[in-house]
Image (cartoon, rainbow, N blue to C red):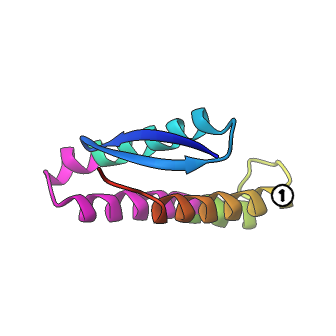
Amino acid sequence: MAQVTVRINGYAYTVGCKDGEEQHLLSMAAQVESRIDSIKTSAGQSGEARMLVMAALLMADELFEMDKALKAGGGGGVRPDGRLGKRLGKLARRAEELAGSLEQP
């Protein structure tokens, strides 16, 4: 198992991931950092836990809206791919696992 150190809101977290998934994990951390930056811009600096919760809620809302659009057939005439819902669920579970394994030095 690989160990990756990600930086979010100025804090370093060491997170475990499968070998070969290091870049993917860094990309996910960059997405979280992007949400944190937008929260700070609109609402100002807040506590670390609150910022992470807000970022998680924003990302969950995006997943919810994408899932709702797919179920409603809002894919622009493209048939929804049943595998996408499974993939989104798998990504959500993986994000929860990663969040549970965060270690702050």
Does residue 86 appear anywhere in the picture?
yes
Q: Pointer 1: what residue?
A: 83
Q: Residues within 10 Å of mark 1 (few under 14, many from 20)?
A: few
Where on the picture, by quarter, is residue 46?
bottom left
- Nearer to the camera, 102 or 84: 102
- Nearer to the camera, 17 or 72: 17
Find out whether residue 45 is within the magenta segment: yes
Residue at screen point 70% across, 61% down: 90
Residue 4 % position (x, y): 50, 39
When the figure is inspected, residue 54 is found, relative to residue 25, above or below; the finding is: below
Residue at screen point 72% across, 60% down: 70
Find out whether residue 94 is within the magenta segment: no
- Nearer to the camera, 68 or 88: 88
Residue 14 % position (x, y): 42, 47
Does residue 80 appear anywhere in the picture?
no
- Nearer to the camera, 37 or 68: 37
Residue at screen point 68% across, 40% down: 19
Residue 2 % position (x, y): 60, 41
Q: Is residue 25 left or right of residue 76?
A: left
* Number of marks in the rendered image: 1
Residue at screen point 74% across, 51% down: 75
Residue 29 % position (x, y): 45, 43
> Does the magenta stretch mainly form a helix, a strand or a loop?
helix
Numbered range of the magenta stretch: 38-63
Instruction: Name the element at disc 1.
Output: helix
Q: Is residue 12 left or right of residue 61?
A: left
| Mark 1: amino acid | Arg
Where on the picture, by quarter, is residue 21?
top right
